[in-house]
Image (cartoon, rainbow, N blue to C red):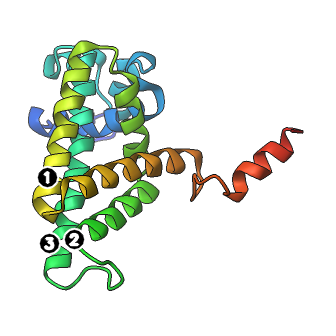
C-alpha cells in the first residue's frame, strides 16, 4: 500500500450499526430528552450520516422508543440477575429476601450508570406523546409483573417496592442518598438559599 492509498473501511452490518445507534441514543436522550435531542447528534456519535439513522429507524420517536426499551430491559436484567444470585446463595448476606436483593441491585445500577437513570426520567417526561406513553406504561407494567414473579411477594410489598424505587430515582437524580423529612441536605439547601 502506498502513501496515497487509504485503507478500506470495514463495512458494519446494519444490525450492529442499529445496536450502536441505540447505545448512542440512550446517552443522548438521557441528557436531552425526546424533543431536545437532535438525531444528528446521535448519528455523529456513531460516525454515520443522519439519513442512515432514518434508514434503520423510521422516525426520531422510533429511535427514542428503542432506547427506552433498552433501558427497561436493563432494569429487567438487573432484577433477574439479583434474583438468581439470591436463589443461589450468592446475593448480599444482609438481604432478607429476593425482593430486597433486587432493590439493592437496582440501587447499585442507578449509581453506576447515570444514563439509564436519566433516560427513565426522560421516558416519563415524554409521556405527553400517546405512543411513548403506551410503550412506557406497558414496559413499566412488565417490570412490576417481573418483580412479582421473581420475588413471589405480596401485592402490597410490590407496591411499596416500586414506590421506594421511584423515590430512589429522584434521590439519585438529585445526587443525594435520602429524601426523608429530616435529611441533612434539605436543611443545607434551605440554609444556603437564605431561608
- Is 150 rendered above or below residue 20? below
Q: Nearer the viewer, mark 3 or mark 2?
A: 2
Q: Could one spot residue 79 in this view of the protein?
A: yes
Residue at 42%, 21% in the rendered image? 37
Residue at 26%, 79% in the rendered image? 91
Can you tell which quarter of the image residue 58 is in?
top left
N-terminal-most mark, 3 or 2? 3
- Judged from this view, the residue extending furthest toward the right is 194
For label 2, the residue is 98
Q: Nearer the viewer, mark 1 or mark 3?
A: 1
Q: Nearer the viewer, residue 107 or 8?
A: 107
Can you tell which quarter of the image residue 88 is in?
bottom left
- Pointer 1 local density, CA inside 10 Å: few below 14, some 14–19, many at least 20: some
For label 3, the residue is 84
* Helix, strand or loop status at disc 2: helix
Q: Which mark is residue 146?
A: 1
- Pointer 3 local density, CA inside 10 Å: few below 14, some 14–19, many at least 20: some
Amino acid at each position: 500500500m502506498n502513501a496515497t492509498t487509504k485503507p478500506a473501511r470495514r463495512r458494519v452490518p446494519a444490525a450492529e450499526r442499529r445496536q450502536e445507534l441505540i447505545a448512542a441514543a440512550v446517552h443522548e436522550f438521557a441528557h436531552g430528552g425526546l424533543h431536545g435531542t437532535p438525531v444528528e447528534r446521535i448519528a455523529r456519535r456513531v460516525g454515520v450520516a443522519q439519513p442512515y439513522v432514518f434508514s434503520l429507524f423510521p422516525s426520531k420517536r422510533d429511535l427514542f422508543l428503542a432506547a427506552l426499551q433498552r433501558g427497561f430491559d436493563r432494569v429487567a436484567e438487573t432484577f433477574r440477575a439479583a434474583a438468581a444470585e439470591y436463589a443461589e446463595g450468592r446475593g448480599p448476606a444482609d438481604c432478607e429476601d429476593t425482593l430486597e436483593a433486587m432493590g439493592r441491585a437496582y440501587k447499585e445500577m442507578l449509581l453506576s450508570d447515570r444514563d439509564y437513570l436519566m433516560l427513565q426520567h426522560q421516558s416519563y417526561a415524554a409521556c405527553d406523546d400517546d405512543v411513548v406513553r403506551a410503550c412506557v406504561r406497558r414496559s413499566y407494567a412488565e417490570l412490576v409483573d417481573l418483580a412479582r414473579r421473581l420475588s413471589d411477594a405480596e401485592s402490597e410489598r410490590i407496591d411499596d417496592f416500586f414506590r421506594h424505587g421511584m423515590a430512589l430515582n429522584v434521590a439519585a437524580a438529585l445526587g443525594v442518598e435520602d429524601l426523608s423529612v429530616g435529611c441533612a441536605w434539605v436543611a443545607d439547601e434551605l440554609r444556603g438559599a437564605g431561608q
